[in-house]
Image (cartoon, helix red, strand yellow):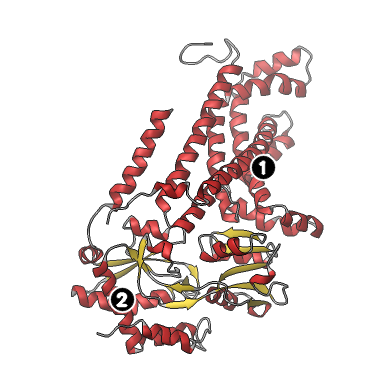
Amino acid sequence: MKPAVGFFVAVFLGITVTSSSFAQGTLEKIDKSGALIIGTRTGSPPFAYINKNNEWVGFSIDLVEQTILPALNKKLGKQIKLEKKESAPATRIPLLSSNAVDLIAETMTDTQTRREQVDFTLTFFVTGAQFLVRKGSPVKGIQTIAGKRIAAQQGSTNAKIIREKVPNAKLVEFQDQPAAFQALSQRQVDAYTNDGIQLAGLKARAPKPDEWAVVGEFFSYEPYGMAMRKNDSEFRQVINVGLMDAIASGRYFEIYDKWFGPKGEVPYPLTPENKRFLQLQVVPK
Amino acid sequence: MNYHFNWSVLWSGQSGGWLLQGVITTLEIFLLGLLIAVLLGIVAGALRSAPLAPLRWLASGYVEFFRNVPLLVWMFFWYFGVPPLLPQGVQDWLFDHGVEFWAGVFALGVYHGARFSEVMRSGIQSIPKTQLEAALTTGLTVIQAYRLIIVPIALRLIIPPATNETVNLLKNSSVALTIGVAELTFQTRQIETYTARAFEALAAGTIIYLVLCLAIASIMAYVERRVAIPGMIVRGQTGAS
């Protein structure tokens, strides 16, 4: 049996190594194919999701379409198409390494561990982990979850923190939001933890939003960035300039308002600190 | 832009423990699922050739209903659909005792039971009818004939396709991660979360599944040789060696 195992290992490694060893810049790749391929979500409103009209839309997607594509068009001197593929926490880094997508634009938290594998754009959204509970639930925040059944999204940073800070909470991890929310609404779990903004999104889209509450102080810091293959500074420069121009010109805030403003999908006003933080990331021309 | 493999993530930190925990959970869900699948498979497979029509209908109904719906749907059914139907006390007990795990076991067992029963039926139907008739003329009742002669012979005949089903059951146990069971695939994703090293984690998972499946295949091949009835099952190569 040993030679067979060796053979499969060799095949497996062979595939992953060859597919990731095309030493071609992302800009060059986009120039040749005429398309920017992004990995994004289908069930994370309002960042990236399928809406009632069956369109794949969201804040992250708008940012790419309205701030990054123009920067790419300008850089390459032609019209670049946008292609979307579905990504999930477990697949987003492999999607990048295998060249299947060029940019992850969804709800990915920028972390030091992830920066060892991929590079991030500047931070385009700031949030933190909270809990979604039925109104009146005894769960009020991370101090009150000991012994409770807590749903989390697998591959998220929140689950990691709960495991470290409250080891006796019973963590049940799901692959996506719909399954976790289903478990919560059927009382299979006592609370669902995720980034506050995503919970606000879920609550807003629930059949009866009034039954639910987003509770607790932020127990984590979740700066969202877009991820790309490591060591491709030319590509990263174009993306970052696109985002910076949008923040400097105010375009970013218009898009923010469309999704998070009072009439947006998920009302979530931008705090003055966060606005200042975004503006401080813009370096002079 | 070369990918640099860093295999040490698999044993540094908690990764090794998680992988081990994953393998144990996978084996637990596999063995319990297999137990249910084999029992249901034998009963339903035997009933499908039973001399009583209603029994045959019952068995066919079970097989067609359960094997023709995707396993993923069954996972959701046993996890989201069944508990609310149970009394509150049972629900609370289940929620405290790993309802995800048991829902996974039932989903796998009942789904694969339907598939096993078809394998079983093919084994029974490949036995000449005269065998049953001969058994009945010795004075055995129908149930005795099935229990003592037909089923034991059929079980020997179906070892190769049953190996297929067993290996499938093991691999399909990974679907349980959708309802939050922390089995092997789940743990490889966990490692990916903590280390951002997906290829290493996936490779480890792949190799472990491969080793487990090869082990099942060799155990089944050993069982096949051990329980063979000399002269009864004629193979292509040498008879009984």
- What mark, if any, has residue B62 been given in the picture? 1
Furthest toward the left, the residue is A77
Residue at mark 1 shares a chain with residue at mark 2:
no
Instruction: Please tell me which residue lies in front, B54 or A117.
Output: A117
At 32% across and 62% down in the image, what residue appears?
A229
Q: Is residue B222 left or right of residue B89?
A: left
Circle 2 residue? A240
Residue B41, quarter of picture: top right
- Within-10-Å neighbours for mark 2: few <14, some 14–19, many 20+: many
Figure quadrant of the N terminus of chain B: bottom left
At numbered mark 2, what does the secondary structure look like: helix, strand or loop? helix
What is the tally of numbered marks visible in this picture? 2
- Mark seen at residue A200: none
**Which residue is the extreme one toward the front?**
B12
Q: Is residue A121 left or right of residue B74?
A: left
Residue B146 left/right relative to B75: right
